[in-house]
Amino acid sequence: MSKITKEELKELQEQEQKKSAILHDLGLLDTQRHSLLHVWADIISQQEAKKKELEEKYGKVNIDLKDGSYTEIKDETE
């Protein structure tokens, strides 16, 4: 049976290990991305609920997130 050299085999094995490590890391990144997308959607949902709550309390306003001040939004029909 013919064989490649030990150095060639070692190089191929190292390349295969690197491929496996990268594939593993890509899987982890995809899982993290998926989790972050769920967190993002949750925050958007919470923010929309808070906006609705504040609109019921203060009416249609623009809120300055730096200091909490707000200005009323005028309807164009007025």
Image (spheres, rainbow, N blue to C red):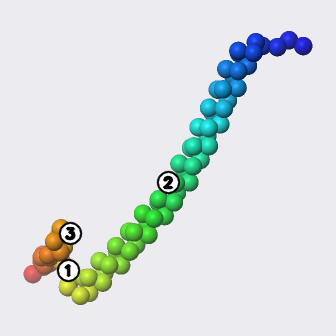
The Cα atoms of the two marked residues, 1 and 2, are separated by 35 Å
- Residue 1 in the image, given as x and y percentages of width and height: 90, 13
Query: Marks 3 and 2, how far apart in space?
Result: 28 Å
In the displayed structure image, the side of residue 36 where residue 72 appears, left or right: left
Residue beneath disc 1: 60
Looking at the picture, tell me which residue is in the foreground, 19 or 41.
19
Q: Is residue 53 above or below residue 18?
A: below
Query: Mark 3 belongs to which amino acid?
Result: Leu
Residue 26: percent from left, percent from top: 56, 43
Q: Residues within 10 Å of mark 1 (few under 14, many from 20)?
A: some
* Quadrant hosting residue 63: bottom left
Q: Quadrant location of residue 46?
A: bottom left
> Is residue 24 visible in the rendered structure shown here?
yes
Residue 43 x %, y %: 39, 69
Q: Earlier in the sequence, mark 3 or mark 2?
A: 2
Residue bearing the label numbered 2: 33
Q: Residue at x 70, y 21 (%)?
A: 10
Mark 1 is on which residue type?
Answer: Lys
Q: Nearer the viewer, mark 1 or mark 3?
A: 3
* Badge 1 or badge 3: first in the primary sequence: 1
Residue found at x 48% / y 64%: 38
User: Looking at this rendering, what residue extends furthest in the left direction?
Assistant: 78
Q: Nearer the viewer, residue 3 or 34?
A: 3
Task: State whether residue 21 is above or below residue 67.
Answer: above
66 in relation to 56, above or below: above
Which numbered marker is on residue 29?
none
Label 3, residues with CA under 10 Å away: few <14, some 14-19, many ≥20: few
Q: Amino acid at mark 2?
A: Arg
Q: Which residue is mark 3?
A: 65
- Can you say which quadrant of the picture contains the C terminus? bottom left
Whole-number angstrom distance, CA of label 1 to CA of label 3: 15 Å
Image position, residue 54 (x, y; %): 26, 82
